């Protein structure tokens, strides 16, 4: 008889959650680490005109971060230098430093080649518009009298 082990159930649940975060939007192959502990942390959401990705990059400016588009993928990379005091020694360090890179594959209606980015107050915001053919367009309705 096999006994129920709640610890193993929690481990399996955590593995399933991590596997779900490896596939942004539930599409395509896994594109790297996601979720808690990944740097920079990001929120991606769909807006009316496309997608918006907001990366938390405190202490970094536009010269420290690179944004590149490759097909349907967008890659954000850079380097975060360690913050060390000019004099004295480090007693405790809780901030992460070093090279980083995160890639995301967007759905087919997105056009990463036309993305634009801005970095303000420690937040890098990348706007990825919809492809022109994927955008809704208004169709003019003509009356029968206008056709004469």
Image (cartoon, rainbow, N blue to C red):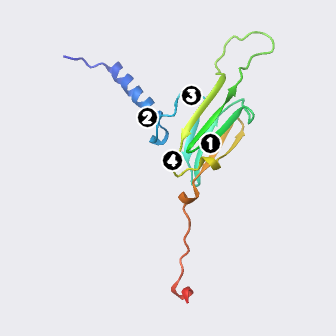
Horizontally, residue 38 falls left or right of residue 91, namely left
Mark 1–mark 4 distance (CA, rounded to whole Å)? 14 Å
- Can you tell which of label 1 and label 4 is closer to the viewer? 1
Q: Secondary structure at mark 1?
A: strand
Q: Judge from the rendering whether residue 78 lies leftward or rightward of residue 31; answer left or right.
A: right
**Which residue position holds label 2?**
20
How far apart, in angstroms, are the residues tagged by discs 1 and 3?
20 Å
Q: Which residue is mark 4?
A: 107
Mark 4 and mark 2 lie on one chain; the one further toward the N terminus is 2
User: Do callouts 4 and 3 mark residues in contact (Cβ within 8 Å)?
Assistant: no
Front disc: 4 or 2: 4
Q: Which residue is mark 1?
A: 69
Q: Find out whether the residues at labels 2 and 3 contact each other: C-beta distance under 8 Å.
A: no
Q: Secondary structure at mark 2?
A: helix
Q: CA distance from mark 2 to mark 3?
A: 15 Å
- Which of these two is toward me, 132 or 85? 132
Q: Which residue is mark 3?
A: 38
Q: Quadrant of the image for the C terminus?
A: bottom right
Q: Quadrant of residue 61?
A: top right
């Amino acid at each position: 008889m096999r006994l129920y082990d709640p610890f193993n159930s929690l481990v399996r649940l955590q593995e399933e959650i991590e596997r779900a975060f490896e596939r942004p939007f539930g599409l395509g192959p896994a594109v790297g680490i996601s979720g808690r502990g990944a740097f920079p942390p990001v929120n991606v959401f769909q807006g009316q005109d496309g997608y918006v990705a907001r990366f938390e990059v405190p202490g970094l400016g536009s010269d420290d971060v690179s944004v590149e588009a490759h097909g349907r993928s967008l890659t954000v990379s850079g380097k975060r230098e360690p913050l060390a005091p000019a004099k004295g020694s480090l007693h405790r360090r809780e901030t992460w430093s070093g090279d980083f890179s995160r890639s995301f594959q967007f759905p087919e209606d997105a056009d990463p080649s036309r993305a634009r980015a801005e970095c303000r107050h420690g937040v890098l915001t990348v706007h990825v518009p919809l492809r022109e053919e994927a955008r809704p367009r208004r169709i003019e309705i003509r009356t029968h009298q206008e056709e004469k």
